[in-house]
Image (cartoon, grey):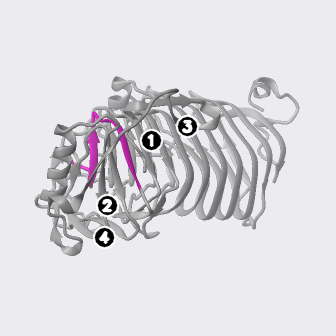
Amino acid sequence: MLLGFSTLALLVCFSCCWLLVLGEGETASCSNISITEFGGVGDGRTLNTKAFREAIYRVQHLPREGGTLLYVPPGVYLTEPFNLTSHMTLYLAAGAVIMATQDSLNWPLIAPLPSYGRGRERPGGRYMSFIHGDGVQDVVITGENGTIDGQGDAWWNKWRQGTLQFTRPNLVEFVNSRDIIISNVIFKNSPFWNIHPVYSSNVVVRYVTILAPRDSPNTDGIDPDSSSNVCIEDSYISTGDDLVAVKSGWDEYGIAYGRPSSDITIRRITGSSPFAGIAIGSETSGGVENVLAEHINLYNMGIGIHIKTNTGRGGFIKNITMSHVYMEEARKGIRISGDVGDHPDDKFDVNALPLVKGVTIKNVWGMKVLQAGLIQGLRNSPFTDICLYDINLHGVTGPRTPPWKCSDVSGFAHQVSPWPCSELSSNQQGSCANYS
């Protein structure tokens, strides 16, 4: 049983993720309640919105030292969206499914995120995430590999048909929250992004499985956004968009909000996607720094590693390290680009150029990679200190497709095959010595 954090001491280290231990001499108590005590029926047809909201109301108004565990037994529990509260554990038993209704008429609308200025897809507000936490702390979502099912196909069809009025809901979102653990749960068929911690800190996502069809639109796996001290590890992700994408706001709104994503560890992730395995961006207007991604295994990918930004984004991307990456069957191995992503409106500042500096990619092995790499900086803001070490990307390169294409970039390459562009010097290591 996982308890609330209120009696826990949190030990942090950037290079080794998070450990939760009881403080010396401390004890923890935790009360347990079941969704069935509040009328929950797991028959896949009964709407359980009232049961979930009443159970969480009980947690909120009858606080216990050590928090309260809300138990969801085996069964399929259909429900509308609901909010979590602080000091609670949502525990899904083996065979338990919390399933989102496909009726959007009663789906709550909430304000756009200030760092985005509008919904990510449509102007105005956005649909609240299926499971939502705003301003909460000490929250755990875990169990015995039960499932949270967003039933996203109805939302995907609205997107394809162009009938969306507002931006689709994420599956799970924490806003302005801290001390969050998500583990040992299956997430499937999200309407939009799957797990989205935004303006949050001290977040651990581990031992999760995230699934969506390969053609499902914008079903990113895990998107830390203007968040700090985040650890994502030991998980399998197969979706229709980036497996993990670190973000920090969109153009002038992200610049004004000014909250970076920082101190993020991503490791031991396996997955498949028509888009990117590990991505930074493209919404990086608040800045992204101190990201470590290691021991990543990618199959049937669009792009293995993708760092993406654009004119008008501003912000910075710096001190990024990606190592021990294996990819098999990828359209492109590595892409670092300054011309990716759309804009929220026509008010963005064309002179707001991103700073991309200090990116180290090392110990990468690829098989059946169609093009090794593309690194394209901006003429008035070249990408600097791009450091490549011990990279082997094998595959068939078309007669008109060079293995690497580079512009407006400087850095260093060592033991890279096929050999990269001349802009990455092999003679002078320079500042890349600090990153090797």
* Depicted 11 relative to depicted 195: above or below: above
- Give the amino acid type for the residue marked by disc 2 in the picture: Pro
Mark-to-mark CA distance, 2 and 3: 32 Å
Report which residue position mark 2 lands on: 191
On the question of residue 354 being in view, the answer is no
Amino acid tagged 1 = Pro
Confirm or deny contact between disc 4 and disc 3 (CB under 8 A). no
Which is nearer the N-term, disc 1 or disc 2? Answer: 2
* Residue at the spot of label 3: 19
Q: Secondary structure at mark 3?
A: strand
Instruction: Report the residue at 49% width, 27% height from top.
Output: 25
**Does the rendering let one see residue 306?**
yes
Mark 4 against mark 3, which lies toward the viewer? Answer: 3
For the residues labelled 2 and 3, say whether their Cβ atoms are less than 8 Å apart: no
Residue occupied by mark 1: 224
Q: Is residue 135 magenta?
A: yes
Q: Which residues are magenta?
A: 125-142
Three-letter amino acid code at disc 4?
Asp
Between circles 2 and 3, the one closer to the viewer is: 3
> Reading the chain from its start, which is encountered first: label 1 or label 3?
3
Query: Which of the two labelled residues, at mark 4 and mark 1, occupies the earlier sequence position?
Result: 4
Are the residues tagged 1 and 3 within 8 Å (C-beta)? no
Q: Residue at x 39, y 24 (%)?
A: 258
Neighbours of disc 1 within 10 Å: few (<14), some (14-19), many (20+): many
Q: Secondary structure at mark 1?
A: loop
Question: Is residue 372 shown left or right of residue 231?
Answer: right
Q: Earlier in the sequence, mark 2 or mark 4?
A: 4
Q: Which residue is mark 4?
A: 153
- Residue 32 image position (x, y, % from top left): 29, 50
- Element type at mark 2: loop
Choose between 338 and 435: the one closer to the eye: 435
* CA gap, disc 4 and disc 1: 24 Å
